[in-house]
Amino acid sequence: MHAFVDIETSNLNADFGEVLCAVIKPERGKLVVFRADEYTGSSTDLGMLVDLRTALEEYVDGGVWVTWYGKRFDIPFLDARLLFHHERPIRKAMHEDLFYIAKFRLVLSSRRLDSVARHLQTKTQKTRLEPRLWLSALRVEKGAMDEVVEHCKLDVKVLSEVYEKLKPYIDTLRRKHAV
């Protein structure tokens, strides 16, 4: 079973940031949402990271994670945050990173998920969040977090639609770019 995965963070570097939210969209079933504002403690992301790791590991035996640049960002960011908290890393599943399919099989002006989705004319399109909204989300303001979570939910929906269009290209690169 495939799991479409995306995270939103407060910084692009795990030593300066935390996970604000994460969404897993199972191939069949409901979205699984993790939000920093639903966790308490000295670090908002510790409990969420452990729960997210558990959810991701459900796909280790026979499942596939599908991400966009997740091999170079999402999973390493999560592992770096887990390491910071003296937690073990995520056990790895088969991982299809669609960024590399777009990079090596399509010649487009941009490899961003938004650009690829527009080119493929997916039904769902990504949203843009204003910088001030991210700043409010960093303060864990509920309204701002709601918008970041909705943005992340749409990202995994777009990702799943892009996956459907790129499926014919996946097998040729699977071994070359395995985690």
Image (cartoon, rainbow, N blue to C red):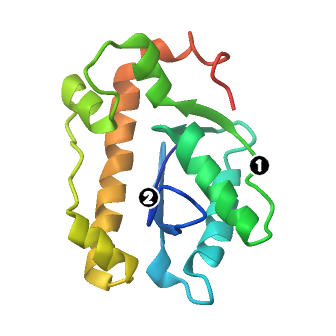
Q: Nearer the viewer, mark 1 or mark 2?
A: 1
Residue 74, x across and y down, in percent: 54, 49
The kind of secondary structure element at disc 2 is: loop
Q: Are marks 1 and 2 in contact (CB under 8 Å)?
A: no
Say which residue appears at 60% left-offset and 64% top-offset.
Answer: 15
User: Which quadrant holds the N terminus?
Assistant: top right
Residue 72, x across and y down, in percent: 57, 39
Q: Looking at the rendered structure, which numbered label has been put on residue 91? A: 1
Up-down: is 112 above or below 91?
A: above
Q: Is residue 73 visible?
A: yes
| Front in this rendered view, residue 11 or 105 | 11
Precedes in sequence: disc 1 or disc 2: 2
- Label 1 CA crowd tier, 10 Å (few <14, some 14–19, many 20+): few
- Label 2 CA crowd tier, 10 Å (few <14, some 14–19, many 20+): some
Q: Is residue 2 visible?
A: no
The residue under label 1 is which amino acid type? Arg
Say which residue appears at 63% left-offset and 67% top-offset.
Answer: 49
Residue 161, x across and y down, in percent: 33, 34
Q: Looking at the rendered structure, which numbered label has been put on residue 50? A: none
Up-down: is 173 above or below 63?
A: above
Residue 5, x across and y down, in percent: 50, 48
| Front in this rendered view, residue 139 or 124 | 139
Would you name the residue on which mark 2 appears?
31
From the viewer's perspective, tell me whether residue 35 is left or right of residue 174.
left
Give the spatial CA distance, label 1 vs label 2: 21 Å
